[in-house]
Amino acid sequence: MARFDHAYREIGDHENIRQIYVYEAPMRLWHWLNAAVVVALVATGYLIGTPLPSYTGDPSTVYVMGWIRFVHLAAGYLFAVLWVMRIWWAVVGNNFARQLFIPPIWSKRWIDGLRYQIAWNLFLVKEPRRYSGLNPLAHIAMLTIYLVPSVVLLVTGFGMLAEVAGHDSWQYHMFGWMRDFAVNTMDLHTIHRASMWLVALFVMVHIYTAVREDIVSRQSMVSTMLSGYRLFKDRRGPDE
Amino acid sequence: MKNGMSTKKTFYEVITEQGIPRREFLKFCAVTAVTMGLGPGGHEVLAKALETKPRLPVLWIHGLECTCCSESFIRASHPLAKDIILSMISLDYDDTLMAASGFQAEAILEEITTNYKGNYILAVEGNAPLLDDGMACIVGGRPFTDQLLETARHAKAVIAWGTCASFGCVQAAKPNPTKATPVSKFVKDKPVINVPGCPPIAEVMAGVLSYILTFDRLPELDRQGRPKMFYGQRIHDKCYRRAHFDAGQFVEAWDDDGARQGWCLYKLGCRGPTTYNACTTIGWNDGVSSPIKSGHGCIGCSEDGFWDRGPFYERVPDMAQFGIEANADKIGLGAMAGLGAAMAAHAGVTATRRALGGRDKDKETEDQDGQG
């Protein structure tokens, strides 16, 4: 447990640390590739449910919906592959790579940090705490409105793909059970779409918070996902 | 009538007695073999089975239903097919179609279940309402649930005709006031073949029965218990308007130019992408048309719970949990707008606070950094 705890490590005010190497190159690569894939998925996914105005012309040469679906399905496969890579890296990478998957709800300090972080976002406390990895609030948000919807999107997505690919496909053998779960496959579409909106909401919150925290918090945010280093702006030790 | 029981005869003997020529018989075999996807020589296998095997006693009972399955069935498209089918399956009991009535009719049930123990097919049209011991559906003075269980006990297999029997259909739609229950969830100890559709296609119904008779086994079923040969493909994948879907050409309103040009009905709620049936391959009324062919989207009538996945004319279905008019898009867009406003306010407060008091501290910090 201490091993996982390390990633949350709150950097106490007495600690004189300038920077910590947090995100290794595969993590950063995953983040940005994933960002691109998610944007493509949400954009094309939205258009599959509520298509563009009709395109005139002969259907032998016009393939608008076909291409939108192609991009969506291709990006969907990439999304799945990226998650597999991400999980693999969580196993072999540093502590910060596996932090997301295990919230230390057993840790009192973490729960206290969660309360504090909420208070900070409600302007109730003057100064945020410093964290090396994800702060507890960011962690909860990432888990509930990104990781969980992502998994739901993946299984419902492949469940629907199984319908397209047919009864003899590997997609059907692997995800055909989604049929039993969903009663009517229309439900897979509805769940998939609702989860898409959750992810879209996450993207909004994520970008806003990352930029805001970069400005007002005591550490770097956006650049950390570029360079991998978490920089701490102030260093106030007990001796100062 | 040597045996005294007409059911001991082969199907072929029965139809020749009725004056149906062999040519018509072979035509029926050919058409049915093709709809079953039996491949070359399939019609010969079918013909041989119908000539040599004793015909299949079928009890056709009716629960909570509208009789649209029977109506569809007696309109099987091929000429004389209705005679062929009706004699083939020796509809020994069908309270809608049989001449007998009253005690005489009910006696047949008893007779078949005793004489053909384990060797007759039970076809169920409609489902059983379980509320109040089945009081919502009384047949011959007793709850339909009793009749269903008694006849199913010695059946070889049970065929659930239509979406009512297969999945519940309209009487099982929310809030399902009579607790209408699909056959497969009520009869647990017998194989149940679901042949959904509201109604199912006549050729599909004939095909399922012919298959059982010909091969003496049940057809391969999918996860929903439906014969794969007829329910293995989506309407969408076989739709003749699919090219317009891929092109992104949609009917936007029922009277627009796209509707006249036969574009895709997806935007007007067509359920083709989520519906498995043979409508687009076999067609209705002798293959004359099908819902999409006649300009109306598929409503997904052969899918479980299709009544609760409305509205039929919108692509993104309602999410009743969030209010009557809500769907995923309205909720999602609403949440985004709300969140956007909250974020703007939050950013505003952050900026104001920094402008009012945060600056000095920042300078201090910079100074410290400069020193350190």
Image: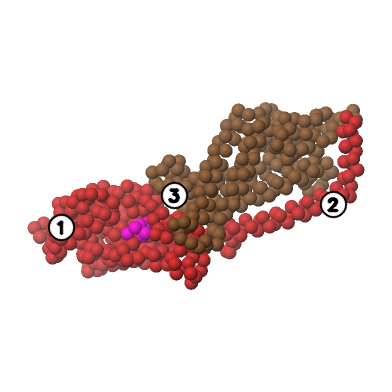
Q: How is the image coloured?
A: by chain
Q: Chain A is which colour?
A: brown
Please tell me the colour of chain B: red
Q: Specify the label residue A70 is tagged with.
A: none
* Residue B30 among those drawn in magenta: no
Magenta stretch: includes residue B281: yes
Residue at the spot of label 1: B12
Q: Are marks 3 and 1 on the same chain?
A: no
Q: Do the residues labelled 3 and 1 touch (CB within 8 Å)?
A: no
Q: Is residue B137 above or below residue A125?
A: below
Position of the N terminus of chain B by quadrant: bottom left
**Mark 3, secondary structure of its residue:** helix
Q: What residue type is labelled 3?
A: Val
Q: Residue at x 91, y 43 (%)?
A: B360
Q: Give the labeled residue for mark 3.
A: A164
The residue that mark 2 highlights is B352
